[in-house]
Image (cartoon, rainbow, N blue to C red):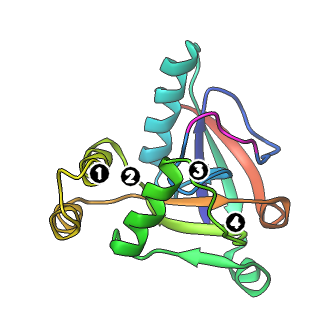
Amino acid sequence: MKLYHGSDVIVDQPEIIKSERPLDFGTGFYLTTSFEQASRWAKRVCVRNNSKKAYINCYEFDLENAEKDLSILKFDLANMEWLEFVCAHRRGEKLNSDFDLIIGPVADDRVYSVVVRYENGEYELEEALKRLKSESLVDQIVFRNEKALKYLHFEMREEAI
């Protein structure tokens, strides 16, 4: 399975680095199956870090063997469980999750506005879920530890244009 990571650096040796900001699924190495999404992430990182180059790092992921060995949490949809999980992580809550890998929709800018309005009490759960269903969501796959990273192999990088 091909996966992509957008950055302002070449990441040929992925690492689990604790982020300064709250992320959808907590600490981990974030990837996607969408080249376009990785390109958007790379450009965003460049702006945030005032960098000159944006890269899409390309990997091969051995999903078949990973599924036999890893503890995987998968959200197929942006449903109530996904929304609560994302909100808890974005609030900085320490969830007791022993998962090696988490797969699910990414809360991009449009989706994030729904999440924020739900967190602030502007949307009830039903309204937030209705709005999330209308969005076309891209996936994200989070490798949360070294055990998971051993199934990920760097192939190449491309410059984002």
- Cα separation, mark 4 vs mark 1, equals 27 Å
Do callouts 1 and 3 mark residues in contact (Cβ within 8 Å)?
no
Measured from the top left, where is residue 113 in percent x and y? 26, 44
According to the picture, the residue beneath numbered tag 2 turns out to be 107
Range of the magenta residues?
17-21
Kind of residue at badge 3: Tyr
According to the picture, the residue beneath numbered tag 1 turns out to be 111
Q: Looking at the rendering, in which quadrant would you find the N terminus?
A: bottom right
> Alpha-carbon neighbours of circle 4 within 10 Å: few (<14), some, or many (≥20)?
some
Asked whether, in this view, residue 140 is left or right of residue 68, the answer is left
Do callouts 2 and 1 mark residues in contact (Cβ within 8 Å)?
yes
SS majority, magenta: loop
According to the picture, the residue beneath numbered tag 3 turns out to be 4
- Cα separation, mark 2 vs mark 1, equals 5 Å
Kind of residue at badge 2: Ala
Residue at point 49%, 57% (across, down): 88
Kind of residue at badge 1: Val
Measured from the top left, where is residue 75 in percent x and y? 46, 74
Sequence-earlier tag: 4 or 1: 4
Kind of residue at badge 4: Phe
Sequence-earlier tag: 4 or 2: 4
Secondary structure category for the residue under label 4: strand
Measured from the top left, where is residue 37 in percent x and y? 43, 46
Residue at point 27%, 47% (across, down): 120
Asked whether, in this view, residue 156 is left or right of residue 139, the answer is right
